[in-house]
Amino acid sequence: MHHRGDHEQGAPELLSPLQRLTSYSVAAGRIPYAAAVFTPIRARRLTLRPVTMADLEDVYAYQRRPDVCRWMLGSEPRSREQSQKSVAAMTGEDGLRVEGDVLSLAAEANGRVTGTVELVWRSRADQTAEIGYVFNPEFSGQGLATEAVGALLGWGFEEFGLHRVYGRCHAGNEASARLMTRLGMRCEARHVESYLFRGEWADRFVFAMLAREWLSRSAALAG
């Protein structure tokens, strides 16, 4: 994954049923490869929109925190200059046009960027993507992370036409594993000592969800 690491500081509430929020619809099983303009996703309490350089201070506020970097592969607390480069990179990740592209979105609530979520288009043929996220612990315990990640999952399945979305996290990152579980993703694997993390072999969980499972869950939550 164009993966900035395993990250999530927790959010206990379940997501409300999603609205269809973009300006085009998707026939089942067909991905709209030519859909060029991303329309911001408006969830119940927040908006997911492309990252801009105006987000620097909010992003730096959490990228400089050791507790945020704890589970991020190869990352240490960042300087403001390093965060500026990170934000600049994310501003270019504004859509899924070809396989391998990354869609990075700011999760904005009440005028603040609470974190970022991303979707990496892993396979066009298999209609598969990987989800990632990082959130400011200042906003933990409010359900915003769950709402933001759920909104992006909904967009990926309902609007972009994905068949499968998966996410990975360090086996010790309990908050990230709980978030994916809350959203109905199942733990498909524990890869034992599958990668080097801070100089030691580490286990990694793989969570995943299919489009039909997402749609069934959304219908059940809608009552």
Image: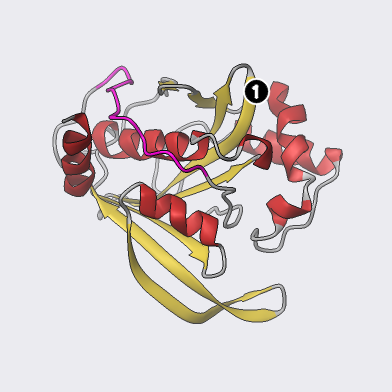
Would you say 93 lies left or right of 29 here? right
Label total for image: 1
Where disc 1 sits, the SS reads strand
Judge whether 211 appears above or below 167 on screen.
above
Which residue is tagged 1?
112
> Which percent across, then down, holds residue 142?
53, 34
Judge whether 120 appears above or below 51 on screen.
below
> Which percent across, then down, holds residue 171?
52, 70
Would residue 97 be seen by someone viewing this image from the given angle?
A: no
Residue toward you, 220 or 52:
220
Residue 5 in the magenta stretch? The answer is no
Q: Which secondary structure class fits the magenta region best? A: loop
Q: Which residues are magenta?
A: 11-24
Judge whether 87 appears above or below 131 on screen.
above
Could you tell me which quadrant the C terminus lies in?
A: top left
**Residue at horizontal 41%, vertical 52%?**
180
Question: Which quarter of the picture shows residue 27?
Answer: top left
What is the crowding at mark 1: few (fewer than 14 residues within 10 Å), some, or many (at least 20)? Answer: some
Residue type beneath disc 1: Arg
**Residue at horizontal 60%, vertical 40%?**
140
Residue toward you, 5 or 43:
43
Judge whether 4 appears above or below 160 on screen.
below
